[in-house]
Every structure is written in C-alpha cells, then in structure tokens.
Image (cartoon, coloured by chain):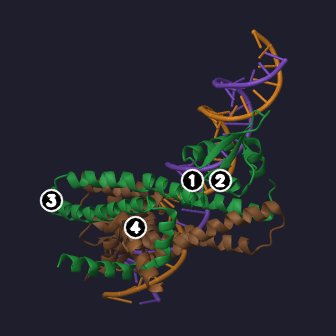
Chain colours: A brown, B green, C purple, D orange
Amino acid sequence: MQMTPMIESFVFHFGEMGSRWGFNRTVGQIYALLVVSEEPICANDIGELLGISRGNVSMGLKELGSWQLVQVQHKAGDRKEYYFCRGTIWDMANKVFEERRKREMDPTLSLLRDIMMDEAGNKHEAYAQQRITEIHDLLENITEWTQSLQSLSPEKLNTLMKLGSGVSKVLEFTDKFRSKKDA
Amino acid sequence: MQMTPMIESFVFHFGEMGSRWGFNRTVGQIYALLVVSEEPICANDIGELLGISRGNVSMGLKELGSWQLVQVQHKAGDRKEYYFCRGTIWDMANKVFEERRKREMDPTLSLLRDIMMDEAGNKHEAYAQQRITEIHDLLENITEWTQSLQSLSPEKLNTLMKLGSGVSKVLEFTDKFRSKKDA
DNA sequence: TTGAACTTTCAGAAATTATTGAAACATATT
DNA sequence: AATATGTTTCAATAATTTCTGAAAGTTCAA
C-alpha cells in the first residue's frame, strides 16, 4: 500500500468528513485507508501512512472494531495484527446509521417519553408538552421506519430507492386495493 | 414564558444533542425554547432564559434564520424583535435533513466524482477507484432517494412509514403486476 | 522466567470550537 | 443632530475535543 495523491485525497477527505458523520478524523482516515486497501495493514504502517501516533491508531482501531467495521488477521511467522475492513459497503452504511441512531435518536426519545409522562403544571407546560409529543411521535416514526428498512435486503432496498418518488404511485395503488377489500 | 423544570430539561437536552445533530448547543437551546413557547420571545429574554450572552443569542438566531426555522415579529409600540419558530415539525425535520445533506453528502459526492474521473496509475489505484465508485453510487442513491421522499406530502410519507418493512410486500406485488403487463 | 515484539492506556499538550462582552452599527424619536 | 433603543460583529477567552508518546500491559518463544 502506498499513498498516491488519489488515495490521499480520498483518505484525508474522509477524515475531514468524519466529524460530520459522527466519528473523529483519525477514525475516518483509518477506515478510508482500509477500505481502499486490498491488503490488510498493520497498526504501525497505518500510523506511518497517515502520519499519526501509534496510540492514536490503537484508539481508532478499537473504535472501528467496536463497530464491527474492521477485522484482524494474522500472518504466519509474524506477531503483528493486520487489519482490514470487512463487509460490503451496505454493511458500512448500516453501521453508520445504527451508530447514529444510538447517539442521536435513542437518548432524545427516552427524554421525550419521560417528559410526556409528566403532569403539566400550567397552560404553558401543557402547550410545551403537546409540541414535545409531536416531536416524539415524528422521531419515533422515523426511527422505527429506518429500522424496518434496514431489515430489508440490499436488493429490495435498491428497488425501493430506484422507485424514488414513484413510490407515491404504488401507495395510491395500495390504498385502492385496501379500500376495495374493505368494501 | 417561564422556565419550568420540564421545559428546562427539554431545552437543555436539545442543546446537548445539538452537536450531534449538526448545530451548536446555543442554536439547539434557542430552537427548543422557541418550539415550546406559544408566544414569540425577544432576543434579550432568550439570553436571560438560557443564561447566555446577548452576542451568542444574536449569532444563534442568525443561523436559525438562515435555515428559515425562525421568524421575526414586531409588537406595536415596541422596537424589539420577537422571534418565534415557524412551520410544522415536518418543516423542521426537512430542514435538518437538507442541511445535513449539504454538509455531509454534497462535498463527499463531489470529491468522489472527481476521483472517479482520474486515470488509475496502477493496480492499487484501480482497486481503490473501484471501491470509491461503490461508495459514490451508494451515497448518490441515498441522496437522490431522500430528496425524492422529501418531495412527498407529509401524509404520503406517513403512510409509507406506517407500512414499514411491509413495503417489501407491496414491491413484490408491483413486480408481479409489471411482469404481467410486459408479457 | 525472561525478554522480545507487539498493543493499549492515559495524563498532559495541542488543536479546534464555542462563548463572551465591549465596541460598532442601525434605526426611530425628539 | 442628538439621543434612545435596539442588533451585530469580532477579538479575546473559555471549554471541549483530539492527539501524542512514554509507561504499563499482553503474549509468546525459548
């Protein structure tokens, strides 16, 4: 593995985007590096290629490991651990979604639920509670929906995505079908 | 508007989550405050209620304004500007998605496209380019899809979300319908 | 059991990001 | 034109996050 300008720009960009996507720069860089590398790479080489400290590499790999995005391999007669990124691109996307849900949705949903259980003390609180309930319901819907989408096969998801806003037509059709059956 | 414990916990939580959702603490707090307030609030009061500086309030409101999430109102015989949060909860969710797309997807897609245009210099680069193309295609699909979903009416979106993974059944059905028509 | 080869941890340093508050700016009123 | 009432900007400061590197930990072969 050598850092050509092409690979560098990809890796560094992924590092920069990392913070927007919910992981730090180092994690982003390491992940990007492993994605484009055909060969597993050892922690030392990762640090060298990226110009970061050994400790930082270790922490980054630990995090990626906890997300099950990298795997370790051993080579005969070598005690080093060689890292590579496992799984398809869908796996990665799924992990990113899942992690974000954990950090962005779950704590909020939990708090909103608590607030909804409270007794409103006055008019203002009653209004606030109503708006909070709206937010809660929306977030819960989105969460459940994305979760159910994640359980679909990549093929199904692809079909669905290709459909785009055409899904609207399918829905109308379903509506008609349903009301006919009910009648 | 008074800060009861209920409202405080909501507002402060929204502030904490802000950084995860792509805005800073102050922006999150101001937005949360305005969401649960029936009455428009002036900048001074916002600063006082949240315990933050006047300058910080101004910057937060500016950002929320640029996202078209808050609006200004004037009261007769009063030169202060009163802020309130306009739009439904869907509008907010849409804005959040849009902003995130701009910051998280667009720059990456643009870089990936550039890389895809490059000529691979060797075997490694060819492999890297292939993986990068996979990522690009996935991100582009997701981006286009979420965009088309955003153009649907809240009602349609709700139907779709209620369907959950049941959408899978509808797809199968549509497939059959299509192949019959083609035959 | 020792030591070589490697990994992990974590306190302090560096870098980044958010916040304050005083000065500049804007606008309506007298 | 002077003043009163508001808003915005931005340099300095504070808070937070990330990174380093030396020390501690782990594992294995001899």
Tag 3's secondary structure? loop
Coordinates of residue A32 in the picture (x, y in percent): 34, 63
Are labels 4 and 3 assigned to the same chain?
A: no
Q: Can residue A119 be seen in this view?
A: yes
Q: Which of marks 2 and 3 is nearer the N terminus?
A: 2
Residue type at mark 1: give it: Phe
Q: Name the residue under label 1.
A: B23
Q: Report, in whole angstroms, how far the alpha carbon at label 2 lies from the one at label 4.
A: 32 Å
* Letter of the chain that mark 2 sits on in the rendering: B
Are labels 4 and 1 assigned to the same chain?
A: no
Q: Earlier in the sequence, mark 1 or mark 3?
A: 1
A109 shown above or below A125? below
User: Is there CB contact under 8 Å for labels 1 and 3?
Assistant: no
* Letter of the chain that mark 1 sits on in the rendering: B
Image mark for residue A168: 4
Task: Kindly report which numbered mark, 1 or 3, lies closer to the viewer in this rendering.
Answer: 1
Q: Report, in whole angstroms, how far the alpha carbon at label 2 lies from the one at label 1.
A: 10 Å
Image mark for residue B122: 3
Rate crowding at label 3 as few (under 14), some (14 to 19) or many (20 or more) other CA atoms within 10 Å.
Answer: few
Are labels 2 and 3 assigned to the same chain?
A: yes
Task: Kindly report which numbered mark, 2 or 3, lies closer to the viewer in this rendering.
Answer: 2
* Letter of the chain that mark 4 sits on in the rendering: A
User: Is there CB contact under 8 Å for labels 2 and 1?
Assistant: yes
